[in-house]
Each structure stands twice: as C-alpha cells, then as structure tokens.
Image (spheres, rainbow, N blue to C red):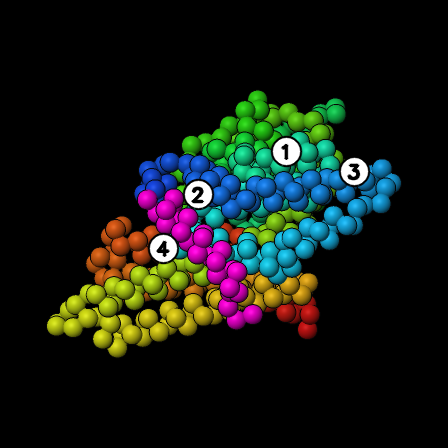
Amino acid sequence: MIDWTEQQQMIQKMVRDFVEKEVVPNLDDIEYNGVPPYAILRKMVQTFGLDVMAKQNFDKQIAKEKAKAAGEAPDESADKEDDSASGSAGEQAAMQMIPIIELCRHAQGLVTAMGVSMGLTGGAIMGKGTTEQKERWALPLLTLEKVGAWAISEPNAGSDAFGQMKTLAKRDGDDYVINGSKTWITNGPYADTIVLICKLDEDGVAPEDRKILAFILDAGMEGLEQSAPFKKMGIGSSPTGELFLNDVRVGRDRLMGGSEDGYGRSGAKGAFMQERAGVAAMAWGIVDRALELSVTYANERQQFGRTIGENQLIQLKLAKMEVARMNLQNMVLRYIEMVSEGREMTMAEASAMKLYAAQTAMEVSTEAVQVFGGFGYMRESRVEQLMRDAKILQIYAGTDEMQVTAIARDLLARA
C-alpha cells in the first residue's frame, strides 16, 4: 500500500470538508476560549455514522457473550455479513486513521478528547469489563453520548505509573473505599464515566507488590471531585484536569472484570500500546499542515526583491519537511498493511514509530515557525499552534526517553 485507495480518498475529502466547515470556524473557541469540544465531536460521530457502527459492533459482541454464557453456539453468519459490509481489518484501520490525520491538521486536541473517551475508556470496559458492566456503561461512551476519562497519572507518578501510584482502594466489607488523586486526566473536568486505576491497600503487602485494580466511576459520586480545566501549552481543544477522591465508596459491581485479578498491569499496558499506535497518524496531520502552510508562505512572502522560497536555506527546510511527511505516511500505511495481514507490531516497532513520529512533528512544526519568521510567532499564522500541539506527542503515551528504553529492552530481549 503506497497511498489511499480511491474510496479512502473520497472519505478523506468528506472528513476534510467537515473539518473546514465545523472545526476551523470554531477553532479559537475550542482552543483558547474554554468552549468544550464535545458538541463538534458528536456532530462528527453522527455525520459519519460512527455511532451506528459502534452500536452494531456492541450488539454483536454482547450477543456473543450471552450466547457463550448460555452454552449456545455463536451466530457465525452475522460475523461474515459484518465483515463483508465493513471490509477487511486493514480497511477498517484506514478508516480510523483518516479522521485522526485530518483533525490533527487543525486541532490535535479533538483527537485526544475523542480517542480517550471512545477508544481508551470505552475500549477498556469492552476489553476487560463483565457483560453487565459493558451493558451498563460502554455503549454511551462508544457513541460519545457520554464523555469518558481514563485515569492513571498522579502528581508523583508519570512514567513510573505503577511504582509511584498512591491512590488506594481498601476493602470495607463487600465494598471498597478509594482515596487519592489523579492529574493530567484528559476529559477529566467533563467526564460522565471514569475508569480509575489504583492499587489495593492490603495489610502486610509491600507497596510495590500491591494489586492493580480498575473501577468504573460516575460523575457526581460522593467524595469524587472533578477540577476545572487546566490552562495548557497546547491542545486546548482537549480539556484536561484533576480528580480528587475522598472516601469514595464503590461496590464490587464497579470493579473492572468483577474480580481483583480482572484488570492488572497488563490491562493498563495494553491501553498504552493502543495510544502509541495512533501517534504517527497524529504527527502526519501536523506535518502535512505545517508543510502546506510553509510552502504557501514561501511562495508569497517577498524579501530583497524575491520570494523567500527562492532562498536555498528555505528550500532545505521545505525539502526536509517533505522527507518527514513521506516517512510518516509510509509508517502509517505500513501499519495498516500489518493490520490487514493480522500481524502485530513488536514493542520495539510500536515504540520506535511513536518516538520518530513525535520528534518529527516537533522538528517540522518548529521549522515552520522559522519559515514564517515573526509572523510565525503570531497566533494568526496557525503554525505556532501546530508547534505547541506537537510538543505533547513527546510526552504523553510514554515520553521519548521511555520509548528509547522500551525499544532497547525489546531488542536486547529478542537477541
């Protein structure tokens, strides 16, 4: 696969037209003026039928689980019909990547807000929850009827998420009582449903050996406080905040998987891998837009009697941007091909993809500001926003430094 198919190009144009019509005119409001992004995102979900597809997939999975629990054979014909209608796994992956790329050309935060709610929070419940928990909480998240947050980070626990985790759940009869705090939580200020990861507080068990649990919380529960949105360097269209838990009492019905062994470290790490897979597509969107704006400006801006695009140093910047864009495109298309063939990336591959994409987005967007000169420092240019948005790619879903460690450890373990 070297480019989008004709059908995928049609979808790309439709998404780009939607973004130009619905996102760009509201960009200042959602990025700088504190307007929550969810109305725009819901309109996008409904416009492209993502809510209908999510409900169909949800109903199919629940029906399978109930049939299995009843000892009945699942209806395989339904799977074949659905596969035929939705296309191959690779085509489905492409359909997921295209909106990410197009949104990130203007507002990367929208992808973060939507991905955490639908993919990370809804996906965690669908992947690790009981059938009853899925029916109770998952579908409104998958359709974005409700907003979801996935809460693991804490003030002293960034890259060392488990080792420094202080939020604890203590058994109290048939219930649990949770105390602690979480920070840098995407959608935290507006979340209706929160998947909270914490440790089990057991007498005689050392902190490093404590079990990792996940609970499903609802906004408004007694003892749960959601902060106002933070003011951030970039991705303003993705609200971020803190959660405070003071004797929050939950029943076992809210314990993910219905068991203290139902989530664990593997559940959280699986979510990290899911995050990393989309970063290359996000970076592609940023780089594509930065290059587009830079080429236009280099052709229009005149200095010393000629356009700045005639200067070799500017040409070098543009040439390197194009190389970066091609590399990111190839990475994303390779990923889609791997999905199509049923192959999974190794930890080294996923981390290398994330590391390169994040660094490249930052480098290209910084050079775009340089091409624009003084105007590039102004909000009106839009390249300054791309630069600020790009920086978070080097931090969330695992910092650059953690990606280096992950790549090396995986390579050494397989040597």
Q: Position of residue 183 (x, y in %)?
A: 50, 39
The residue at which mark 4 appears reads as 386
Q: Position of residue 395 (x, y in %)?
A: 47, 53
Quadrant of res 126: top right
Q: Earlier in the sequence, mark 4 or mark 1?
A: 1
Which of discs 1 and 3 lies nearer the camera? The answer is 3
Can residue 169 be seen from the camera position used here? no
**Which quarter of the rendering shows the N terminus?**
bottom right
Q: Position of residue 50 (x, y in %)?
A: 55, 45
Q: Residues within 10 Å of mark 1 (few under 14, many from 20)?
A: many
Which of discs 4 and 1 lies nearer the camera? The answer is 1
Which of discs 3 and 2 lies nearer the camera? The answer is 3
Q: Residues within 10 Å of mark 2 (few under 14, many from 20)?
A: many
SS class, disc 2: loop
Q: Residue at x 86, y 41 (%)?
A: 72
Amino acid type, mark 2: Ser
Q: Residue at x 40, y 58 (%)?
A: 286
Looking at the rendering, the stretch of residues picked out in magenta corresponds to 1-25
**Which quarter of the rendering shows the C terminus?**
bottom right
SS class, disc 4: helix
**CA distance separating discs 3 and 4:** 46 Å
Q: For this view, does 170 lie left or right of residue 117?
A: right
Number of numbered discs overlaid on the protein picture = 4
Amino acid type, mark 4: Leu
Residue 66's mark? 3
